[in-house]
Amino acid sequence: MSGTKEEERKGSSQWRDFFWNPRTHELMGRTATSWGLILLFYLVFYLFLAGMFALTMYVMLLTLDDYNPTWQDRLTTPGMMIRPKGDQLEITFSVSDTESWDGFVQNLNNFLSPYNDSYQVQTNDDCPPDQYFIQEDSGTVRNIPKRSCQFNRTVLQECSGISDPSYGYSSGQPCILIKLNRVIGMLPGKDGQSPYVTCGAKKEDSAKMGPVKYFPPNGTFNLMYYPYYGKKAQVNYTQPLVAVKFMNASLNSDISVECNINSNTLAEGSERDKFAGRVSFKLRINDK
Ligand SMILES: *[C@@H]1O[C@H](CO)[C@@H](O)[C@H](O)[C@H]1NC(C)=O
Ligand SMILES: *[C@@H]1O[C@H](CO)[C@@H](O)[C@H](O)[C@H]1NC(C)=O
Ligand SMILES: *[C@@H]1O[C@H](CO)[C@@H](O)[C@H](O)[C@H]1NC(C)=O
Ligand SMILES: *[C@@H]1O[C@H](CO)[C@@H](O)[C@H](O)[C@H]1NC(C)=O
Ligand SMILES: *[C@@H]1O[C@H](CO)[C@@H](O)[C@H](O)[C@H]1NC(C)=O
């Protein structure tokens, strides 16, 4: 009994000695100098880590540029989009039911408002066509703000909403606008050849699609609208458009239309990326 008590006392005094040994002045088995050195080591170590982190961040921020993205996906071929655009890529309406296409017309009116000739003349330049509008920075001197080229609404002719305010929807010959997604620095054609859009129907629908008209003629995105320098550098940039007018599409049937970009510099959209250089949508015109 007493033996165990003795042992207990001994054990606890050993433990106390370990915690603070008054004879050797050791705290948890180390002298003050030893503790001091350890603390100093960790202090220096963590300061070093913090310094490394700060330096790396600083260098990273130095390489960032307000006007050019440092990292840009290597998108060889940009995607395309249509207007009017609803929840789905689907243009379904009845010729005789004004309400069924009124939304499309409103959508196009809003979208084309900044393309008004009067507005384009105020904000953008009348550039020489069929050549790039190059505005590079010279060395470290930024050439900003950069100008942009006019894309007049009247270029879309029958699809401009000016001569025909219903964009052909009231006569069953609807217009669809196509745009190519913006990619900074993209050069979409060489040898003065602008890229152009062609639309076709998928397999069994080809007879149903009928002939189409393109505006501007040949469905080109003129080279003068490229390269694009980014929203911040080119504040008034107006994206070029191609309008496709379906002249005699079959009524009361679903038509799967696919439009492609044809360019001598952009790679053909691969099977892997269904959205590169093409856009597909469903067209259905009902007669009542
Ligand atoms: C563009 O013209 C249409 C009519 O042609 C007009 O309703 C619209 O307000 C104009 N937009 C601008 C931005 O001037
Ligand atoms: C953008 O358009 C405004 C007029 O709306 C014009 O005053 C300004 O100079 C234009 N800026 C550039 C860079 O073209
Ligand atoms: C746009 O329209 C204006 C006025 O109608 C005209 O002066 C200008 O040359 C046109 N620009 C282009 C690129 O067609
Ligand atoms: C359209 O393409 C044809 C043949 O490729 C060409 O002869 C014609 O000049 C083009 N039209 C325009 C307005 O670019
Ligand atoms: C329109 O297409 C129909 C067949 O879908 C055809 O019978 C008709 O002749 C075409 N009209 C014109 C003007 O091409």
Image (cartoon, grey):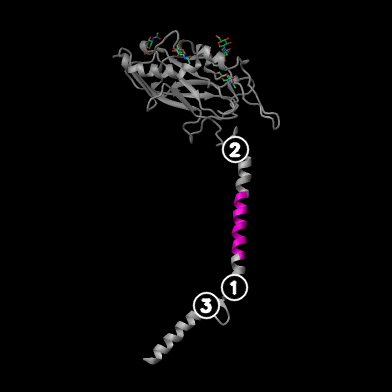
Residue 208 visible from this viewpoint: no
Q: Foreground mark, 2 or 3? A: 3
Magenta stretch bounds:
40-54
Name which residue type carries label 2.
Thr
What kind of secondary structure does the magenta stretch mostly adopt?
helix
Q: Residue at x 60, y 50 (%)?
A: 54
Mark earlier in primary sequence (2, 3) = 3
For residue 32, the mark is 1
Q: Which residue is mark 2?
A: 70
Distance between mark 1 and mark 2 Cα atoms: 52 Å
At numbered mark 1, what does the secondary structure look like: helix, strand or loop? helix
Which of the two residues, 221 or 213, is positioned nearer the viewer here? Answer: 221
At numbered mark 3, what does the secondary structure look like: helix, strand or loop? strand
Give how far across and how far down residue 160 sits, in percent.
46, 13
Which of the two residues, 61 or 19, is positioned nearer the viewer here? Answer: 19
Distance between mark 1 and mark 3 Cα atoms: 11 Å
Number of residues whose C-alpha sits closer than 10 Å to that of mark 3, classed few (under 14), some (14–19) or many (20 or more): some
Distance between mark 2 and mark 3 Cα atoms: 58 Å
